[in-house]
Amino acid sequence: MSEPIRILCVDDEVNILNVIRRQLCDLDVELHPALSAEEGLRFLMHTQPVQVVISDYRLPGMNGIDFLKKVATEWPAVTGILLSGFADLEVVQDALEQGRLLAVLHKPWKAEELQKLISEAAGRSAKRTLSEVEPS
């Protein structure tokens, strides 16, 4: 039996975290919620690694793109997905081109979209992890 996909989900709205939990209940995932970027970073520093981080754009203290850039720098095997209804398209495009994000999921989204992105993100994360441990 394979390991569940470990996901950190950061959003300051509890109802969004609950929607994501419900939409992913059919997948083999281990979902860890956080209400701020700071809480998400603390979680990442003090726990087992995750494969995927889902982050809202609008967060208290630090926006989702800056948070995901920090995650990508500290934990390069992690794949980021940004949730947004408000993001600056130029900034998002730049983050996508730099490989910091897999995708932007615009609110409201469909459960199938999220499930597909999670599967894709987990595969991308696994490839990055393998490339880190394989000798050059």
Image (spheres, helix red, strand yellow):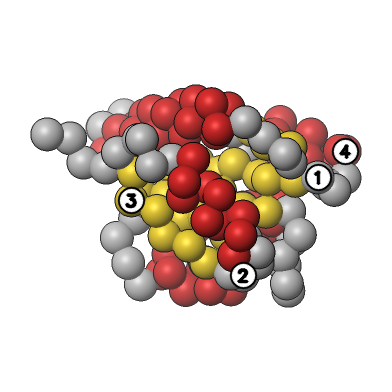
- In this rendering, which labeled residue sits more in front, label 2 or label 1? 1
Q: Nearer the viewer, mark 4 or mark 1?
A: 1
Residue 47 seen from this side: yes
Tag 4 secondary structure? helix
Query: Which quarter shows the C terminus?
Result: top left
Q: Nearer the viewer, mark 4 or mark 2?
A: 2
Give the quadrant of residue 32: bottom left
Alpha carbon separation for disc pair 3 and 4? 32 Å
Q: Which residue is mark 1?
A: 85
Q: What amino acid is found at the position of numbered circle 4 in the picture?
A: Glu
Q: Secondary structure at mark 3?
A: strand
Lower position in the chain sequence, tag 4 or tag 2: 2
> Looking at the picture, which amino acid does disc 3 mark?
Glu
Instruction: Give the mark nearer the N terminus: 4 vs 1.
Output: 1
The answer to which of 55 and 19 lies nearer the viewer is 19
Mark 3 and mark 1 lie on one chain; the one further toward the N terminus is: 3
Secondary structure of residue under mark 1:
loop
